[in-house]
Image (cartoon, coloured by chain):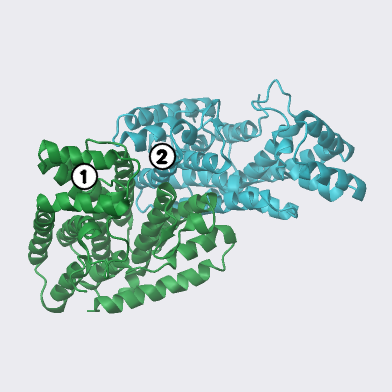
Chain colours: A cyan, B green
Amino acid sequence: MFKIRDLQVLISGEIDREVKQLYETAPKNLYEPIGYALDMGGKRLRPVMVLLAFNLFSETIEKAYPAAMAIEVFHNFTLLHDDIMDQAEMRRNSMSVYKKYNENIAILSGDAMCIMAYNYLLKCNMGDPSHMLQLFSQTALEVCEGQQLDMDFETRSNVSISEYMNMIRLKTAVLLGCSLKMGAMAANAPDTTADLLYVFGLNLGIAFQLQDDLLDVFADQDKFGKKIGGDIVSNKKTFLLLKALELSDPETRKILQEWISREEFNAEEKIAAITEIYNQLNIREITESFIDEFYQVALDVHEELGLTGETKTELLQLASMIMNRDH
Amino acid sequence: MFKIRDLQVLISGEIDREVKQLYETAPKNLYEPIGYALDMGGKRLRPVMVLLAFNLFSETIEKAYPAAMAIEVFHNFTLLHDDIMDQAEMRRNSMSVYKKYNENIAILSGDAMCIMAYNYLLKCNMGDPSHMLQLFSQTALEVCEGQQLDMDFETRSNVSISEYMNMIRLKTAVLLGCSLKMGAMAANAPDTTADLLYVFGLNLGIAFQLQDDLLDVFADQDKFGKKIGGDIVSNKKTFLLLKALELSDPETRKILQEWISREEFNAEEKIAAITEIYNQLNIREITESFIDEFYQVALDVHEELGLTGETKTELLQLASMIMNRDH
């Protein structure tokens, strides 16, 4: 059994090789931006999940590389197009693709990445790859649905918590479930095991996204990559905000809504005021215990998998890595 | 054997059913624009090619619907994203998707269409669909390459005719070859026959695109859907222009280049001046005989297929429909 750190090194090597090749493929304006996008780094969480799930059942890890690459290329395609839609100029401390090149190049390179993801999957040396392709393609469409819901929420004032949960399930969680399940499928694991891994990943994914919402407000600025309070400034309808709107008395809700509708404001002041309301309403503790519910489901499923020894601990290690609980 | 007209009716019915369903699928902002894009009409040339090729070998035409839908949805995805890139506000006398909705919706709906195209293919009830998926996915990537080359050419002044031919092969012709080959594959036709159909479609596709370049200048305005001379006004590097630049003496070439570089001009005047140069250089006749070369290759391949009776005439009828020679 490989350690997570080993898997990260292995997949990074694969990605580096691919990037190098992309930089040399014509047309340059199509493939260089793809190389650039894949070269931006990150924890390579999703392809590591594919490899780890595969490794639970098989040691010939290189057989899972195509599926891992498919997931990573697909994920980076969604980031690339999301950055155009959000007009996000930076990504992991580098210029986003549309900013470095231009929007047209970013649209088309993204399209090519989506297609390339399928090409990787078609390289998987499996008997009949139909089931894996169906899972992947279904998941890919769900991710698009999640992204559309997220955009819809920006202009809606009446988003419910259950709508929000559905959105993060689609936008974030299904791809984590899919990554683990695809790894298991590539190793010809039993269907029931592959399905349990999907549920494990899905619940982790939901916990992961809620944690992300929480960290935006309550992280240590020193350890947090981005600026604290970004979601508050942009009125992002996070679990924290929706819960605060739900729990607040009419007077507090009015103050919240006033901050949301204000066009001009001092960012620090807005962050402080809304954080203060979150504190009054115990939003931090409520969110933490909500996260724990999903994390606990994941742990229960983990037990149900009946793993032992290294396989058991390594999968658990993955869970705590996803939740940022290991560093 | 179905007639082309029957196949058009059949696939239109399929598309209508799909459109109706899309209009009722949530999230509305993701799926309604896809329904709108598919509902714009057109000759449904590519899906008809899938059905016709299938029908050469099998009468159970409904088995080819998923492959035909995959091709049509993919083709409309490329049109949808192309319209964003070209800022084309109209498509087939309707507002283009990005204009009717907005750019973000158009980007994401297009992404979903690309994924949906694969979902259709995965519905094909075949033993192992890998080969068909590989052909489709390879072709899809080539279409992206062609689109990128086309965009690259806009800002280049030294495009050679062989570069242009490579671009139209990728952007237009490979999808026609792929449509026919996929239809044959769906009917489990022999590999050699499927390959011949690909070559037939590819050569027809090249002839089709060159014809398109020619009609932009020399069509009867009455029968032509768009305004004559659009490519001339926008300095599009068509076969006609590249050939004229190649054949002209230094003085004429200077006049051509002057028109190309002029920022302000009267459109009618520019069209008249450049058409006059084309006439002096016999560009119309040269292009027509160049088209005939590719059309002839297609006809030779058609003979090589060894079809007889209805199958033979129907495939020939398709060729003349593609070349606009039947109406």
Q: Are marks 2 and 1 in contact (CB under 8 Å)?
A: no
**Residue displayed at 87% across by 47% down:** A254
Q: CA distance from mark 2 to mark 1?
A: 20 Å
The amino acid type, in three-letter code, at marker 1 is Tyr
**Residue displayed at 38% across by 74% down:** B12
Please give left or right for residue B161 compared with residue A83 in the image.
left
Query: What is the secondary structure assignment of the residue under circle 2?
Result: helix
Please give left or right for residue B163 compared with residue B290 in the image.
right
- Closest to the observer: B256 or A8? B256
Residue A146's x, y, as percent?
59, 51
The amino acid type, in three-letter code, at marker 2 is Ile
**What residue would you read off at disc 1?**
B164
Name the quarter where the C terminus of chain B is drawn: bottom left
Residue A68's x, y, as percent?
45, 39
Residue B210's x, y, as percent?
19, 55
Name the quarter where the N terminus of chain B is drawn: bottom left
The subunit carrying tag 2 is A
- Closest to the observer: A33 or B250? B250
- Closest to the observer: A212 or B18? B18
**What residue would you read off at disc 2?**
A105
